[in-house]
Image (tube, grey):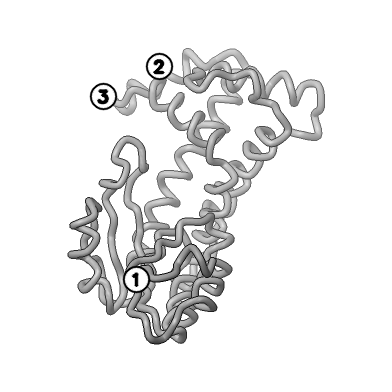
Amino acid sequence: MSEAIADSDLIISAVTAAQTAVAAGQIAAECRRDVDVFVLDVNSASPRTKRACAETVERSGARYVEAAMMSSVPPHGIRVPMLLGGPHATELEPMLAKLGFAATVGSASYGVVSAIKLCRSVIVKGMEALVIESFLTARRYGVEREVLASLVETFPGFDWDRQAAWFWRRVVQHGKRRAEEMREAAVAVADAGVTPRMAQATADVHSWIATLRAEGVFATAAADADWRELARLIMRETEEQPSRR
């Protein structure tokens, strides 16, 4: 860590949600008070976690800026829309623009842009979880054609078949990270005084798919596998081992 951040003007923390506070502590331990440095935290964590990270980092003399990525990184790359938060966000924005980021200031207070991000995640990651559960069930009953036709009629213009494949592939690839994000979303929801029923259930679905991937269930699937192929692999596995459903 010491070598990684030595003489840096900008440190970017990009880890999984569960490691956000750990990374902030490690960075703070190595920051020197005589060096002016920004710490940009792009992790998907709750407002509570981001505020704690800000306190940790700023005790070291560094300037903490939280960021919320508001879309999937592919296909945007470094140009993924990003909201900046905290009292140092306005100062950091020009530096990020020169580097090629598409970042705008969302709030001068910590926790606000993370709240925006995680409220969005309850919808986006929740849709992924709903599609996996619904389509896997439909596949087992042999009624996916009828379910898809009904969805197309109800939501015309939405390509459910294509979008379902995208949802499934994203969860298979990023389920562990997304489960951690949704646990942080559940913290954010609970801190707002709402019981996080959907956020927690979404975390459970993503975690389940991540476990299946770690155990090799999707090892034979191509990178561009259709959702039906991914469902088939789950069905084969869970029929052989019902406890893994």
Give the percent coordinates (x, y) of residue 137: 60, 25
Which residue is identified by label 2? 149
Which residue is identified by label 3? 157
Question: Is 186 in front, or is 134?
Answer: 186
Give the CA separation, mark 2 to mark 3.
Answer: 12 Å
Which residue is depicted at the point 40% across and 61% down?
12
Q: Is residue 10 left or right of residue 140?
A: left
Q: Image quadrant of residue 218? A: top right
Give the percent coordinates (x, y) of residue 219: 65, 23
Quadrant into which the N terminus falls: bottom right
Give the percent coordinates (x, y) of residue 11: 40, 65
Which residue is depicted at the point 46% across and 78% down?
31
Q: Image quadrant of residue 113? A: bottom left
Which residue is identified by label 1? 65
Q: Give the numbered dot on residue 170.
A: none
Which of the two discs, 2 and 1, labels the residue nearer the N terminus? Answer: 1
Question: Is 166 in front, or is 13?
Answer: 13
Label 3 environment density (alpha carbons within 10 Å; few <14, some 14–19, many ≥20): few
Report the amino acid beneath label 3.
Answer: Gly
Label 2 environment density (alpha carbons within 10 Å; few <14, some 14–19, many ≥20): few
Is the C-beta separation of discs 2 and 1 under 8 Å?
no
Give the CA separation, mark 1 to mark 3.
Answer: 39 Å
Name the front one of labels 1 and 3: 1
Element type at marker 1? strand
Give the percent coordinates (x, y) of residue 167: 46, 32
| Residue 190 seen | no
